[in-house]
Amino acid sequence: MPWQNWWFPARVGEPAVLKSDRTMERRQILKGGVAGALTVWACPRRLNGQQAAGGVRRVTDKLAVVDGGGSNVVAFSSGDGFVLVDGGALNSSGEVMAALRNLGPNSKVQTLFNTHYHTDQTGNNEMFGAAGAKIIAHEHTRQWMSTDYWVPGEDRYEKARPKAARPTETFQTTGSLKTGAEQIDYGYLPLAHTDGDIYVFLKTSNVLAVGDVASPLRDPALDYFTGAWIGGRVDAMDIILGLANDQTKIVPASGPVMTRAEFKAERDMMEEVRSRVWKQVLQGDGPKDMLEAGVLKGLARTWKDPYKFLYAAAKGMVAHHNKLDPSVV
Ligand SMILES: [Zn+2]
């Protein structure tokens, strides 16, 4: 199928795809009730024994991963309150605060990083911001949160977040800070999942939070309308591999804490998908053709919604055609 046929669908009534990766999935979980949610978090094989006790997985004596409505909240206790990487999804403030109170005598959040703009990561920004937390994010994340924007997959606009929810300190490339003895370096991961993804590397603890740039359980998602694409994702994963060593604990936006080897396996799988999708795009194929040609077959994982993923992957690939080959016009 010529790619133009699927690249320029009618704006309203466009095939339902994408959006912030998890809004749809959360709805499905809610529809499935508590039993559905438990199947995500209580599966011992997938979590490699990392079940959360009371929504908390201890990673080091100062650092835990807290369940924030199905999203990972990295909580580092500095002794003088917390540094968080992502603050949990909408409506998860009660469970996140209860977990923080259990983790340390001083549950005040001094600093909150947002790995990207999705509400699964920024849902509690208002609460933490109002309590005085500094909110650090990439400048593009602040911009997405500061304006209404069109959500193609849901045929609606997402409203700008209130001022109190927006990042208070932004950066373009890298930054660092020190809290107690902990050195924290953070940096941009261009166009991997959105156009504002960042990593936050708690170097002293050797824990690397990578947001939705790794997706060990959920389908990898690409907000193609921000410019995110598979090539950006693979490049970003290479940046992470360059930072990590064999002892580094890598924390994705949801799902289990990963070793570097597990992260590398996901990176290699994404590179294989990139290569296959690219071949199909060169033939003028759209996502339906790709699905029928079996571009996701024979991989180490399966997709819950392969069409949705391929739609975003193909759109992103064509949007970046100028970087790829002059034969794609
Ligand atoms: Zn996301």
Image: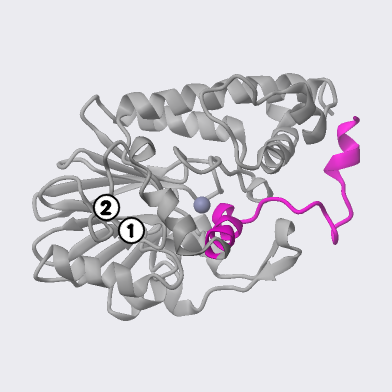
Distance between mark 2 and mark 1 Cα atoms = 8 Å
- What residue is rendered at 67% in x and 20% in y? 276
Q: Name the residue under label 2.
A: 52
Q: Mark 1 vs ligand 1: CB under 8 Å?
A: no
Q: Please check the rendered image and state whether residue 7 is part of the magenta-colored stretch, yes or no.
A: yes
> Foreground residue, 221 or 85?
221
Work out whether 270 lies above or below 103. Answer: above
N-term-proximal mark, 2 vs 1: 2
The part of the image, by quadrant, that contains residue 148 is bottom right
Q: Is residue 203 left or right of residue 223?
A: left
Task: Residue 99 in the image: state x and y as whole percent.
Answer: 23, 66
Magenta residue check for 61: no
Q: Which residues, given as a range, are shown in magenta?
A: 1-30
Q: Mark 1 points at which residue?
A: 67
Q: Position of residue 233 (x, y in %)?
A: 53, 34
* Residue 37 vs residue 95, the one in the foreground: 37
Query: Label 2 is placed on what type of residue?
Result: Ala
Q: Quadrant of residue 128?
A: bottom left
Residue type beneath disc 1: Asp
Q: Residue 251 carries which label?
A: none
Quarter of the N terminus within the rendering: top right
Quick one: label 2, few (<14), some, or many (20+) residues within 10 Å? some
Q: Is residue 33 above or below residue 266?
A: below
Residue 296, position as x, y percentages in the image:
65, 26
Q: Residue at x 70, y 69 (%)?
A: 157
**319 to the left or right of 238:** right
Disc 1 is placed on an element classified as strand
Label 2's element? loop
- Where does the C terminus fall, quadrant-wise? top right
Which is more foreground, mark 2 or mark 1? 2
